[in-house]
Image (cartoon, rainbow, N blue to C red):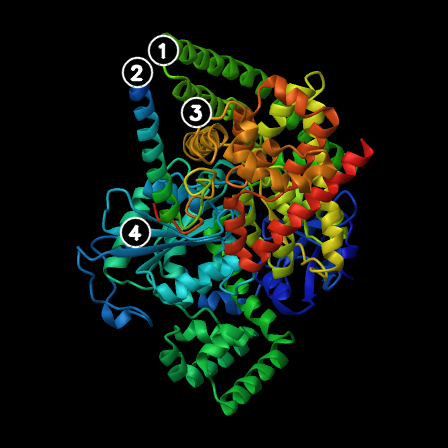
Amino acid sequence: MKLSQLSIGKSARITAVGGDGALRQHLLDMGVIPGADVTLVRHAPMGDPIEIRIHGYELTMRKADASQIDITTKGLEPQTDPSEDAYVALVSEIPHPGLGEGGRYHEEQTAGQGIRPQAAGINEIIKLALVGNQNCGKTTLFNRLTGSNQHVGNFPGVTVERKDGVVKGHPRVTITDLPGIYSLSPYTNEEVVSRRFVLEQKPQAIINIVDTTCIERSLYLTMQLLELGRPMVLALNFIDEMEAAGGTVRVNELEQMLGVPVVPICAVSGDGVDELIDHVLHVARYQEGPMRQDFCPSTGPRSAVHRSLHAVMHLIEDHAERAGIPLRFAATKLMEGDTLTSEALQLSQNEQETIEHLLKQMEEERGMDRQATMADMRYAFILSVAGKTVVHPRESKEHRRSQRIDRILTGRWTALPSFIGIMALIFWFTFNSVGAWLQEVFEEGIDAFTGAADSLLTAWDIAPAVHSLVTDGVLAGVGSVLSFLPIIICLFFFLSMLEDSGYMARIAFVMDRPLRKLGLSGRSIVPLLMGFGCSVPSIMASRTLPSERDRKMTILLTPFMSCTAKIPIYAFFVAAFFPSNGAWVMMSMYLIGIVVGILMALLLKRTACRGEAVPFVMELPNYRCPIPRNVLHLLWEKAKDFLERAFTVIFLASIVIWFLQTFNFHMEMVSDNIDSMLAQIASPIALLFQPLGLGDWRIITALVSGFLAKESVVSTLGGLFTPESLQAALNTTTCYTLMVFCLLYTPCVAAIATVRRELGGKWAMIVVGLQCLVAWLVAWMFALVL
Amino acid sequence: MNVQSWIVLAVVVVAFVAVFRYYWKKQRRSGGCSCGCCDGCGASGSCGIKR
């Protein structure tokens, strides 16, 4: 029987994991191994993908991938292997102090491989690495340790690049927050960042943070980190949540079995964090590595792994030393077929063949292939350790709550209406209710200030040119943009709610099937939705996608999602031309962006991005209440960013535009700006826009300035047009055409720079050219139809 | 132009130069990121800035 055939609510045991390549390795790393018990939780609304529960957490995968996993529904009683107890020695009396505490130090003769007993000087700079699964609280702990305010969220893959910080109270200790990984076999780009850092930068110590509520899966990465032999401390995060549900972890026993200090913490409240830092500094200063690295039993059915692994270790010892890779880690990765390790070791043909013989013998004895055998060996150890040290809780209230909410938000008939309803509510609150009301209040304040400044300048009898510079240049430019701050903050507030609550991951689950028809995977929805906020972080977020094709396609489509910087443009025109049905016009812009994005996706699927979307394997986190501090911090950062842009790039652009439109090439002040330098420069380009009905040089100037920052379009229009001249230059049709062009044309320079960083200069140029072309064509079609 | 006009003009010019210098330095520091995303929009440090 296949996993895809299992009925909802039923449980089964995995007997074989089919498929090949990186996806299969990823599934094995995530605990989908022969012998694991699995329960089918639900199907996505369109029947695919499916949500399963395995090792105490929820995982989603497509039916096509599930159909490669064999299961049996017979004999689901707990499995025991008497040989496991032999290598997990339960210590009845735990001596104190424990590992990593002052007063207890590794003795040189007991130190295993990789342990360097010499103590680091107290003034030496200590480099720490923060490593863990996705969404286990790494960045929350990083913020707690360093006092930083890095962005956190409740979906897998918020952190896509390493971040460094100095530990509070320890000026000579730096810590690096790494993207979440499930194992040291890299699956996505950001996982490569983590693996490289741990292997190549060689931090003095590692803090391995684990999600205690699904400790079995988390310890899989722990075991690979132990194989590196680096000093390490295990931080048990979410212990509060586990204890509240009646579970606990026998910390001292776990510490003895793993051979590294174990500290229970709560990264959100800060409980246990001081103790954690004391322990990690201790192991880093004294270079106390793990007390054990050998997890394979020498007796029983799994002894085949032990014999093969140790044989391989002996064989490659000299190569591993030359390559600077910890021996045990090199051997296990080689046995898993890790090509990066294999290349680094530079084995001879003879050695490769010998290893192949050893692995074939192991496969024959174990009755499963090498990747599954290695995963099975690790999970057998983990389950044995967890069986002795973890008191599993009853179902936590967070999980119960998540299941109840998911019955509606991911239900077969309710998921899509819920998604559309939530998005509609967000836009309604932003553009027609709270956001619009706040904007009016803000606008009145800015108008009052501008009026007061105007009166003051008149009273001081300021020269007309200077008066015009201040009122028409600076105040009109900056003021016209500033008034949109409340709307932008409002939209970001709702987006952060989606992200922090855990709903973003559900959207990916629900939308996977529709997106697959466009050639994308469900995971692409996260960057695309973030694109409604700002294209820059959303382009960066595409790093969580495991295939280059999916990344490229998502990046090319993200700029079609209307970012918040375009809101001032829409609001400016809506106020002038569509005052009675502004919210509908605004929403139509978002819809046009989405529709054009869909059409582009279909086009790309058949041209530049041929092929199938990558498999969709993602963990579904429990819903959590957004932390007010995080939300407020995000809003403050957005507000600060917007204000900074208004008072830097918009301020500079406003003055430059004012200068160019006030003077001619002889530096004489012009009475009519048709004679200005700006008109002379922009007029030839305006010819290109005549078919759209937008042949006015002032409009072209505004569009060009939008390349710097989209808000600049509004400040430029505010400086070049009076309300009367704007009504004369445009009508409702041409205005709507212009809004469509603004929606779709080239992203701002920051977004282009990000595309260049992610895909290279060629693709950045393609994005600029493609977007301008698409914008012109779509706007032209609207000009014809309307 | 009267004295007040010169004063106002000087204030605007000084502000322009100061903002330009700040903006220019920030661009160079951030390696081309002009939207302030490295400090502002949640992608802190993502374009390589070490704050």
Q: Is residue A358 visible?
A: yes
Q: Quadrant of the C terminus of chain A?
A: top right
Q: Determine the CA span between mark 4 and mark 1.
A: 58 Å
Tag 2 and tag 1, C-beta contact below 8 Å: yes
- Residue A461 disc label: 1
- Three-letter code for the amino acid on which mark 2 is drawn: Asn
Q: Determine the CA span between mark 3 and mark 4.
A: 44 Å
- Three-letter code for the amino acid on which mark 3 is drawn: Val
- Three-letter code for the amino acid on which mark 4 is drawn: Thr
Q: Is residue A397 visible?
A: no
Q: Quadrant of the N terminus of chain A?
A: bottom right
Q: Where is mark 2, residue-wise? A: B2
Q: Determine the CA span between mark 4 and mark 2.
A: 58 Å
Give me the residue at 36% from left, 32% from top: B16
Same chain for marks 3 and 2?
A: no
- Asked which secondary structure carries label 1, the reply is loop
- Residue A174 disc label: 4
Above or below, A554 relative to A353 = above
- Three-letter code for the amino acid on which mark 1 is drawn: Asp
Same chain for marks 2 and 1?
A: no
Camera-side mark, 1 or 3: 1
- Asked which secondary structure carries label 3, the reply is helix
Q: Determine the CA span between mark 1 and mark 3.
A: 18 Å
Q: Where is mark 3, residue-wise? A: A474
User: Sequence order check: which comes first, mark 1 or mark 3?
Assistant: 1
